[in-house]
Amino acid sequence: MEDMDKVLDTLRGLEWGADLGPLAAIDQMIADAQGKAEATAELEKAMLSVLGSASAAGRDFICRRLVSVGSAACVPTLSGMLTQAETSHMARLALEAVGAPEAAAALRTAAESATGTPKIGLMGSLAKLKDGGSVTMLAAATKAADATISHAAIWCLGQIGGAEAVAALSGITANDDATKLAVADALLLCADRLLAEGNNAGARDLYRKYTGEAQPKQVRLAANKGVLASVRR
Amino acid sequence: MLLSDSNPSANQHSRREFLKQSSAAAAGLAIPYVITSQALGNAHRAPASDRIVMAGIGLGNMGSGDQGAFLGRGDVQYVAVCDARKHIMNAAKDRADKHYQNSDCKPYADFREILARTDIDAVHIATPDHWHAIQVIQACIQGKDVYCQKPETKTLREGPLMVQAARRYSRVVSGGSQRVLEDYRGVVDRCWSGELGPIKSINVNVGPLAQQCYLAAESTPEDMDWEMWLGPAPWAPYNSKRCDGNFGTSGNSWRSYSDYSGGGMTDWGAHHFGGATFAIDVRSMQPEEVLYHEGDQGPHLTFKYPNGILLTHNCPGKENMQVEGTPGEKREAKPVPSYKGQGGIYGDFIECVKTRETPFRDIEFAVNSVAVSHLGIIAYQLKRNLKWDAAAQQFVDDPQANRFLDYARREPWLL
């Protein structure tokens, strides 16, 4: 335990360029704890105890280890890092790996209130976790004045898919070509998923929106291929 | 990914279509004197309307070599370059301008501006590995064909997303390992000719794994867009060794560090595993099991393919690309696939851009062979056996291993 205290002290004050030798013990402990729930939980608890007071490099080091040993228990601590630009990504790095319902709920709550690039990252993590509970929030974000946020929300809805996401995407009035392409890409992805699920008619309805001459060539190709596939299957 | 906020015109004609129509119109109006000899082409240069309009993204060591290969082709018109380092970007522009004896090549600091250009048919990508998936997928969405340097993926999750984007938008996407066909041809020929009988196994020796990077902060050079260089990778302070593009993997290049590369295991692994999986004809598969072995001479691996063939990694006593066949047993000979067109792997890509055929190093084959590297890295990290469901792209009943399928991209980049 004395050794662990020293390691945790090192973590608190870790700077870029520091000798990582003293921290090798943590990686060894993680390796030894593999498959042992109690040992893993102890390690997680110890690292969480210094996460809030750790330097930027220390936070980086800890969050990367939480990818291995994190559980629902780390969610409350990481939640506090999600909306700030300096800490959001590292918290998401750990939470995406944890993937527990608690992690998705924390990401969702943070995404509701976050602004700027952290909001984009949070939406992206929820999309990756295919979090159906985020669709309402994402639909609202498609109306954001900041195009980087609205386009990210469109992309995330495509990743999640499902009837609600399709409805939200279909309701977007796109006035510029970049937004039109973003919506087309998202809906084509939804259509591909419907086709894979055997909902040929639903997929065909979406593909048919994009077969017209006004669409970019690659979009027309994707849509026409989709229509053909939906008829053949 | 973050879609561009630039303004690609959805119904704008491509440059080639425009040139074809302009030429036809000019002929109709009997004013052929406005068409230059450069546009008409000659024995070494296709007419402008038949050239593939290309741009490069990432023009350091590998990218400049790729640029040179494409510039040297008479059927390519090279029009734009992009790099996070201004001096590299400017040098790449100068190469193109010098080649064409004009100043038309346009430099960009943001690759999204290149991808939004509707006059560009294809791009070559030679950024560090952590950028490949986002850039390849975005290029496909924007209707570009892509030549992507190896290793094409940084994680297991990226591969199927890249393949799906290529297929959805009917894009030609070629991986970038010329060694797969050119370096191991002898081994490939012996396997495909049937001379060795049914193949039992092949061995690959390659490494090392990438390491984590906590290098000290240095002042960022003025001409470096550090945020763009890092892109989706975790934030870290600038250090010249962190981002150097040299080919080493022992600490003085980005290839050494796990935020940007899989180390030698993916960098040379893309060549070696690519050649090995070609030789034993499993390019369309991924292993279903990885066995981790501890030994006096260090750990090593055995990958089992669904058809029973084994691929070993760093197996003690075995040479790189050493094949074990079944002497005395017959195996039917098969013709060895090769490049289309002229000019090696670059010519293969350009020919396929023209004909819409599948390139030799199709992205799906590339993804499958780099997957061997990624599976191996995870087995070495966890120091145990793994079972892989290639259809589901998940480790079987192994939530711990599934944590390493991917990583969270730094905002605002999404994948």
Image (cartoon, grey):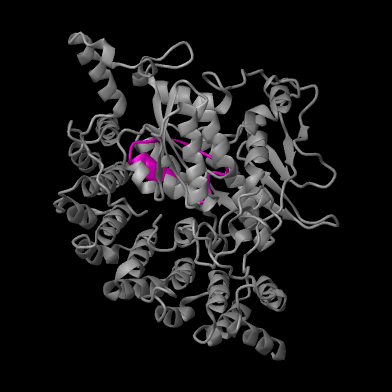
Q: Residue at x 66, y 47 (%)?
A: B247
Tally of numbered discs = 0
Magenta run includes residue A140: no
Residue A62 is drawn in which quadrant? Answer: bottom right
Q: Position of residue B80 (x, y in %)?
A: 41, 38
Residue A232 seen from this side: yes
Position of B338 with respect to B25 (left or right) is right
Q: Residue at x 54, y 81 (%)?
A: A55
Q: Position of residue B40 (x, y in %)?
A: 36, 14
Name the one closer to the observer, A20 or B300.
Answer: A20
Q: Say if B66 sits above or below B347 in the image.
A: below
Magenta run includes residue B145: yes
Name the one closer to the observer, B123 or A119.
Answer: B123
Residue range in magenta is: B136-156
Q: Say if B22 sits above or below B114 in the image.
A: above
Position of A140 with respect to B71 (left or right) is left
Name the one closer to the observer, A71 or B365.
Answer: B365
